Image: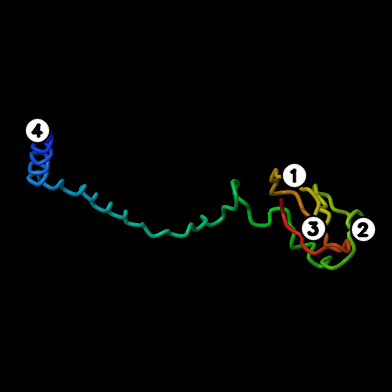
Amino acid sequence: MIRPTLFAIAAFAALAGCMPVPAPAPVPAPMPVPAVEPVMPVTPVSGVAGLEEREPDLCGAKNYTSYLGQPGTLIPTMGISKTYRVVEYRGIEPQEYDPNRIVFRLDASGNIYNVDCG
């Protein structure tokens, strides 16, 4: 009985030595890197700031530049006949644009630091 078992083991060993070596798994080809397009800077269209077109000094803000540095309490005494808005330091300002309205912007100490239209 030893012989058939020994014969089977010997046959298996002989056949195992004749089997081909499995091929290695194929290595996937590297993916090509997409070309990076250069980023072009966005240049604003002249005369356009934000979503609305800004007109050049329709409100006459240049007439009030002599008040720059003066206290904001002088604004009601200026005799302004147009609509105007006073924007406090770090105050919330509505975003509707009116090219005929004068806007006085105040600094932290309450002085006028900018006059423009809006």
Residue tagged 4: 4
Residue at numbered disc 2: 73
Q: CA distance from mark 4 to mark 2?
A: 116 Å
Measured from the top left, where is residue 91 in percent x and y?
A: 81, 51
Sequence-wise first label, 4 or 2: 4
- Residue at 82% x, 57% y is 89
**Which sits earlier in the primary sequence, circle 2 or circle 3?**
2
* Residue drawn at x 56%, y 55% as measured from the top left: 47
Quadrant of the rendered image containing residue 9:
top left
105 or 2, which lies in front? 2
Q: CA distance from mark 3 to mark 1?
A: 13 Å
Q: Amino acid at mark 4?
A: Pro
Q: Residue at coordinates 80% horizontally, 47% vertically from top-left?
A: 83
Q: Nearer the viewer, mark 3 or mark 4?
A: 4
Residue at which label 1 appears: 94
Question: Mark 1, mark 2: which one is toward the viewer?
Answer: 1
Q: CA distance from mark 4 to mark 1?
A: 100 Å
Alpha carbons under labels 1 and 2: distance apart: 21 Å
Q: Secondary structure at mark 4?
A: helix
107 or 103: which is nearer to us? 107
Disc number lying in front (4 or 2): 4
Q: Position of residue 108 (x, y in %)?
A: 85, 62
Identify the amino acid type marked 1: Pro
Tell me which numbered mark, 3 or 1, is placed earlier along the sequence.
1
Horizontal side of residue 111 vs 45, given as left or right: right
Residue 53 pos. (x, y %): 59, 49
Q: How crowded is the residue under tag 2: few (<14 C-alpha within 10 Å), some, or many (20+)?
A: few
Lower sequence index among marks 3 and 4: 4
Check if mark 3's residue and mark 4's residue have beta carbons within 8 Å.
no
The residue at which mark 3 appears reads as 105
